[in-house]
Amino acid sequence: MVKIKVCGLTDPSEAKAVAEAGANAIGLVFAKSPRQIYPDRAREIVQNLPPMVQTVGVFVNESPEKIRQITDYCGLDLVQLHGEETPEICRELAPRAIKAWRIRTEADIQALLPYQEVVKAFLLDAWSPEAHGGTGETFDWSIAIEAKKVLSRPIILAGGLRPENVAGAVKQVRPWGVDVSSGVENAPGKKNIGLVAEFIRRATLD
C-alpha cells in the first residue's frame, strides 16, 4: 500500500491528529518558508507522536553539520534535501537522506542518477521559481512513471496533490509514497484534519 507523508506540520496536537488519521510520516520544514519550524518545537512534536510514525526534517542547502545537529536534537528519522545538494552531501547524510527534485522535463531524471547509491528515496516535486516546495502546483506525472523505470530507489510523488487528485495520481504512477502539504491546509502550516483523513482514504483505495 502507498505510504503517506504529510509535510509542513507546526503544531504538536495537530501533528498527533495527522498521525492518528493514518499518516505514515510527518514532515517538519526547517528551511525558510511559511511552514518553517524551529528545533525546540519540532522536538516537542516528535516526542508526542506515536512510535510507528516516521519524522522527516526538510532542509534546503543547509550544511551537513547543521542538519546532523538538528536531526539528533529533535530525534528525526530521515532528512529530505530540497535544494541543490550534491551527491557528496547526500553521502555525508546517508543512510537518512531523501533527495527531493523539482521536475521540469524528462531530462531531470538523468540528473538523479548520481544520487542513487547515496539516498533512500527520491521525492519528485513540481518546479517553481518562487519556492522549493509546498506551492500546490502539479507536474507531468508521466515523467514520474519514466523515473520509476530508470531509478532504482523508491519514488515519492509530491507537487499539488490533494484529496481530489491523489487517487488518480496513485493509480497512474504507482509511487512508493505520496507527499501532501498545501493540499490539506486551511492556511500554511495549519492542516485540516478532515482533509488529511480524506486524502489518506482516497490515496489508499486500491
Image: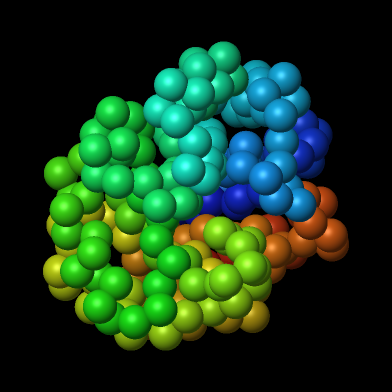
Q: Camera-side residue: 177 or 118?
A: 118
**Residue depicted at 43% across the width and 21% down the height:** 65
Q: Is residue 148 left or right of residue 183?
A: left
The answer to which image quadrant residue 31 occupies is top right
Residue 20 against residue 2 in the figure, above or below: above
Callout count: 0
Q: Is residue 189 left or right of residue 18?
A: right
The answer to which image quadrant residue 102 occupies is bottom left
Quadrant for the C terminus in the image: bottom left
Residue 9 against residue 180 in the figure, above or below: above
Residue 86 drawn at (x, y percent): 30, 46
Residue 56 against residue 39 in the figure, above or below: below
Quadrant for the N terminus in the image: bottom left
Q: What colour scheme governs how the chains and residues are painted in the rendered image of this protein?
A: rainbow
Residue 67 drawn at (x, y percent): 48, 27
- Note whether residue 22 is visible: no
Q: Camera-side residue: 115 or 150?
A: 115
Q: Is residue 1 left or right of residue 192?
A: left
Residue 34 drawn at (x, y percent): 76, 52
Q: Camera-side residue: 66 or 17?
A: 66
**Residue depicted at 42% across the width and 85% down the height:** 140
The answer to which image quadrant residue 37 occupies is top right
**Residue depicted at 24% across the width and 60% down the height:** 112
Q: Is residue 7 left or right of residue 185?
A: left
- Note whether residue 85 is visible: yes
**Residue depicted at 40% across the width and 79% down the height:** 104
